[in-house]
Amino acid sequence: MSRWRYWFLPAFLWTGALLPAVVAVQPAIASPIPPASQQDNQRQDRNNRNQKAPSQRQLFNELATPYKSWLNEDIVYLITDEERRAFLQLSTNEEREQFIEQFWQRRNPNPDSTDNAVKEEHYRRIAYANEHFASGFQGWKSDRGRIYIMYGAPDSKETHSQGETWFRPPSEGGGQTKTLAYETWTYNYIEGLGNNVVLEFVDTTGTGEFRFTTDPSEKDALTHVAGEGLSQAEEMGLSSKNDRFRNTDGTNSPMALPGFRSAMDNQFSRIELAAKIWQPPPVKFKDLESIVSSRIVRDQLQFTYRFDFMRIAGDTLLVPITVQIPNNQMSFQTSDGVHTATLNLFARITTMTGRVVQTFEDTVRRDFPDTLLQQSLRGASIYQKSVPLRPGLYRLDLVIKDTTSNDVGVVTTRLAVPAIEDEKLAASSLILADSISSVAAKDIGIGQFVIGSTKVRPKIDQVFSNAQSLGIFLQFYNVKVDDKTHKNDASILMQIFQGDRQVAHLTQSSADMKQNGEQLTVQQVLPLNGFPPGKYRVEVKATDALANQIVSRSAEFTVTPAEDKNAAAQASPAR
């Protein structure tokens, strides 16, 4: 990895001492006229001074689209002003790619690791935000999405629905009222803000868009209703509800009860919180380490693989790389009646010019008791690693070594990451899976086979017995949302064909799926017990009525009889 250094020159403010004014009376003397060459030099100096350096906006407009998206979407909440200025000054795409590499490496908590936990966690948070905070636009653009991406999940969270009764604390005037829907997030500690940071988000429009606020009265649904939701002082006639709108601190809160005002009720504390909460998290500046790796490989271990492509944010895609190794390719050691095989896996993704984009290494271990060994040898072990990549053409080198036999298998292949155009209905890969299930909240976006809040285990050979179920997983992007209703108008048609004959179909609307954002996620499990053995094709088509656009994805699969033992042997996840 090449080193890229940035030099920042400190700006100094020079102050000159005040000189006493000296008044002298001298006869008027005509100033000499400079020679023509000197006049030309002076004119050129003035022209140079009048030519302003390009603004950041001008430099940004000159960027290619992928780099604009990276700046304004992928890392818009992380990049510092200094980094942004430095990036905009770069003149070649190669320099920009090197900068992006260093941007993530500077944030890598373990520079010696081939993985970058910060980068992976960042894109997981974006995926989570899109899954949970969308409201007429992608979730990463929302206030809750932004806070979640910057600081992660809160240590505690309270969720309140519209119409709940709220008993104001004495510091906010006391009394009871009704609320709009709101959430309160509490972080035990945020660097730069301190301990016990409490953030509030209110849905003031009833559309599911929760906006950050430092005004405690923002959630009061009766603020503008005369005579309703009064504070204690207002109920006793000691103040008027109209007084709330004369506040000079930017809130519409009632007057605090005497002796109950806290430091956090101070307007300056709220202003400080509102200013600091949006600042990019601090960067631990790290030097880059050169990474040199070489492998001598022999193609002795056979395995299969596949790629899938899911959009995260902007033009960045999540690329799950799935590897399946037949168990009978492994060498086992036996101890206490347990047969154990261990594989070392190494992968490296590079650009076509040889620049390393991502590497990862892992250990795959399989344990089978005596009673299950022979049955397990008919199956396979499956492993997956998801990496964020931007559109482009890459090379993937994948090496697997059996630590018992020292047999090695290698694949060198082309990895073409597609671009997803803005404002155009688009789709992810269509994944046919032998298992689709929801994951616990704490595991969303984490671990093998997890896409958002769903665990999707691909069936690489796409061969299913008719005792199994067919899992169908697909995402559609850039679904148009009505500006007034904040809802989309899309429908999904799933069809299964045997040859040219349709044998099954299912139609769903986005309303049926309860998905109203710019992204639709299709996940369906179809039992195959009524399907005769043979070859089939599944097609999933999305129709966007508002944009008048259609996009579809299809894939072939094979159904075998349940008594076919080879087909019945399942791929199991590797550890």
Image (spheres, rainbow, N blue to C red):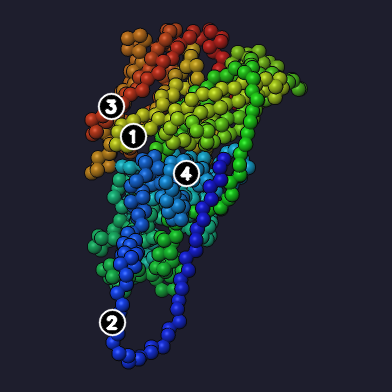
Nearer to us of marks 4 and 1 is 4
Residue 283, given in percent of the width and then of the height, sits at: 53, 53
Q: Quadrant of residue 44?
A: bottom left
Who's the residue at 36% across and 40% down the image?
A: 65
Q: Give the SS element for disc 2.
A: loop
Asked whether, in this view, residue 328 is left or right of residue 353, the answer is right
Dots 4, 3 in contact, CB < 8 A:
no
Q: Is residue 153 above or below residue 481?
A: below
Query: For the residue marked with disc 4, what is the amino acid?
Result: Glu
Q: Amino acid at mark 3?
A: Ile
Tell me what residue is drawn at x 56 percent, y 42 percent: 2
User: As shown in the figure, which amino acid type bears the numbered disc 2?
Assistant: Ala
Picture residue at 39% right of the left edge, 71% below the top? 257
The residues tagged by marks 4 and 1 sit, at their Cα atoms, a distance apart of 25 Å
| Number of the front mark, 3 or 2 | 2
Give the Cα distance between marks 4 and 3: 38 Å
Front position among marks 3 and 1? 1
Q: Which residue is mark 3?
A: 550
On screen, 258 above or below 184?
below
Inter-mark Cα distance, 3 to 2: 81 Å
Label 4 element class: helix
Residue carrying label 2: 30
Q: Residue at label 4?
A: 95
Q: Amino acid at mark 1?
A: Glu
Does label 2 or label 1 sit earlier along the sequence?
2
Which mark, residue 159?
Answer: none
SS of the residue under disc 3: strand
Instruction: Find the residue positioned furthest to the right.
Output: 336
Quadrant of the image containing the N terminus: top right
Name the quadrant of the C terminus.
Answer: top right
Q: Which mark is residue 421?
A: 1
